[in-house]
Image (tube, rainbow, N blue to C red):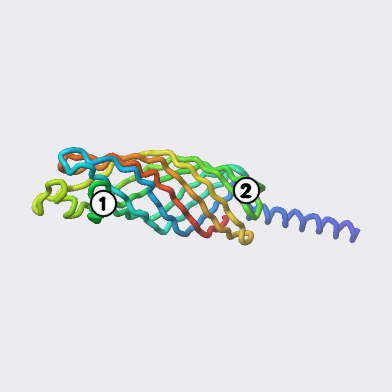
Amino acid sequence: MKSKFCFALSALTAVAALSSASAYAQSQGSWLVRGGFMQLAPQVTSGVLSAPSLAGVQTSVSNSTQFAGGITYMVSDNLAMDLPLALPFQHDLYGAGSITGVGKIGDTQVIPATLMLQYRFGAAGAVFRPYLGLGATYAKFDGEHSTALLSGLTGGTPGNPTRLSIQSKLAATLQVGASYKIDERWFIDGAITKTPLKTRNTLSTGQTLDITLNPIGISLGIGRLF
């Protein structure tokens, strides 16, 4: 009788241990929350500012690094929905083409609202889990500013400076990444994304400049499993 009781107790302990381990795996129904940093690096191909303007006026765009993270829900042991989160990215615009070297001509904030569907390789409790993602990003441009330099190049005046607006756009996003399990609850997550994105800059003078941004995003953070 005593041996049967010990066997049953051992079996229950093993089941409890397995249940506890699965609860802390990237398995169906679990939530993953992460925080860290992300850099957006536009891969710029600039068009030419429309007439009337100096010939060959183009623009380049700076990189931007910001606090970032995200929330992931495991739909199954391998499929996940991921919502990246970040503070607005600040990008500076500089003269390029025929006005290379003139300096900063404007700046803008970008809020990339993204939703990803991921496929995570390997077992739910694996230490290393690479993943691929496909989703959509709505790039919201906000708070655009132009400099006195841009006004001077486009016929603006101190009393009526040239204003800049950038068209917000929807685009697909591709992702490759991986997570590394530190312990049963904590993990490190890193990913690279690319978003084929084209937009249009419009000036209050009526001139336009089409630009291909195609930003590459590089993120690294620490996460916790719930």
Q: In 3D space, how far apart are the residues under numbered discs 1 and 2 (Cα atoms)?
A: 52 Å
Q: What kind of residue is marked 2? A: Ser
Q: Position of residue 150 (x, y in %)?
A: 19, 50
Q: What kind of residue is marked 1? A: Thr
Q: Residue at x 33, y 45 (%)?
A: 140
Q: Position of residue 144 (x, y in %)?
A: 25, 50
Q: Residue at x 25, y 40 (%)?
A: 48
Question: Would you name the residue on which mark 1 appears?
Answer: 100
Q: Residue at x 41, y 40 (%)?
A: 196
150 on left or right of 77: left
Q: Which mark is residue 27?
A: 2
198 on left or right of 147: right
195 on left or right of 8: left
Q: Give 111 or 43, whichever is nearer the viewer.
A: 43
Position of residue 218 relative to residue 80, above or below, is below
Q: Which mark is residue 170?
A: none
The answer to which of marks 1 and 2 sits earlier in the sequence is 2
Position of residue 2 relative to residue 166, above or below, is below
SS at badge 1: loop
Q: Residues within 10 Å of mark 1 (few under 14, many from 20)?
A: few
Q: Give 217 or 154, whichever is nearer the viewer.
A: 154
Location of residue 90 (image quadrant): bottom left
The mark lying in front, picked from 1 and 2, is: 1
SS at badge 2: loop
Quadrant occupied by the C terminus:
bottom right
